[in-house]
Image (cartoon, rainbow, N blue to C red):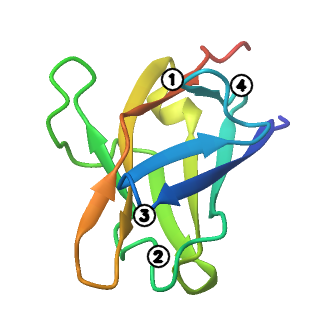
Amino acid sequence: MAISVAQSAVTVTFNADTKTVSFGGAGYNNGQIDLLADVGLLTLELLNPPQGVTFPSAPIQFVNTSRLRPINPPRGATVHRLDGAKATLLIIASQVVAPERLSFYVLVQTPDGEFFGTDPTIVTMPPING
């Protein structure tokens, strides 16, 4: 049995003047990231961060889709911070969580210890065909 893997790369930009986080890149489409496979690999890259701005040790905070309150990571979702806190990798085994929409905040940390996040980004997992 073959396992399909979807990879998506999204850039994350922190604007120090407005204290906002925004997304871009081919993997980001109007507020949604689609990983259409058995296993989804999402790489987030902090693009040209201001001096000292990094992803914190826990760069992803999953939230309840309807009330946007923090929840534990869903079974099958693993987050790794890579490359000296400049990129994070989110691995989702869709056979465990599909079909589901997962909402989460992407967090950045400034040198003075403040945290800033985004509106939730949605990852859609399709049902497994088989």
Q: Earlier in the sequence, mark 4 or mark 1?
A: 4
Q: Say whether disc 3 or disc 1 marks the residue closer to the N-terminus.
A: 3
Dot 3: few (<14), some (14–19), or many (≥20) neighbours within 10 Å? few
Q: Where, quadrant-wise, is the N terminus in this rendering?
A: top right
- The answer for how far apart the CA atoms under marks 2 and 4 are is 29 Å
- In whole angstroms, how far apart are the C-alphas of marks 2 and 1? 31 Å
* Amino acid type for the residue under numbered disc 1: Ala
Q: Along the line of sight, which residue is nearer the eye, 52 or 39?
A: 52
Which residue is disc 1 drawn over? 98
Number of the front mark, 2 or 4: 2
User: Going 80% across and 36% down the picture, which residue do you hit?
Assistant: 4
Q: Say which element carries label 2.
A: loop
Q: Which residue: 64% across, 82% down?
A: 83
Amino acid at the residue labelled 2: Thr
Residue lying at 34% horizontally and 76% vertically, measured from the top left: 110
- Residue 43: image quadrant is bottom right
Front label number (4 vs 1): 4
Going by the picture, which residue comes out furthest to the front? 17
Foreground disc of the pair 3, 2: 3
Q: Nearer the viewer, residue 123 or 11?
A: 11
Disc 1, SS: loop
Report which residue position mark 3 lands on: 16
| Residue receiving disc 4 | 36
Above or below, 68 against 11 in this view is above
Q: Earlier in the sequence, mark 2 or mark 1?
A: 2
CA–CA distance in space, label 4 to label 1: 10 Å
